[in-house]
Image: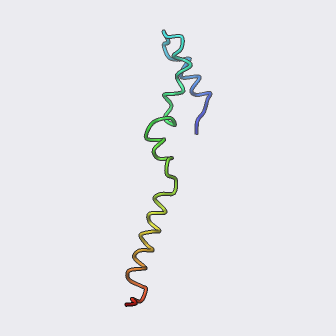
Amino acid sequence: MIDPAKIVEKAQKADIKDPWARREAWRKHPAFSKMSQLKGMFPGFGIASGLFAVYLAYDHFAKPKKH
């Protein structure tokens, strides 16, 4: 969970020579990393893939074959 107070606290503790660096500190938060964004891009994809594999196995092995 993103805690704005912690971000502000980190920004204030940092040795800031650039006046805009404190305003840009939120971009360094892990919630905005590329990997975090990729993980959230396809929610439920793993569950859907698993269920589809189970369906394919059922279709292949359990259903009677009709010619």
Figure quadrant of residue 38: top left
Q: Position of residue 62 (x, y in %)?
A: 42, 85
Question: In this view of the protein, which residue sits in the foreground, 9 or 23?
Answer: 23
Image quarter in which the N terminus is found: top right
For residue 5, above or below residue 62: above
For residue 10, above or below residue 19: below
- Residue at image position (49%, 11%) is 18
The color scheme shown is rainbow
**Residue extending furthest front?**
67
**Residue extending furthest right?**
5
Numbered circles on residues, count: 0
Q: Position of residue 48 (x, y in %)?
A: 48, 63
- Residue at image position (48%, 28%) is 28
Q: Position of residue 20 (x, y in %)?
A: 53, 14
The answer to whether residue 49 is left or right of residue 10 is left
For residue 43, above or below residue 60: above
The answer to whether residue 8 is left or right of residue 64 is right
- Residue at image position (48%, 13%) is 15
Image quarter in which the C terminus is found: bottom left
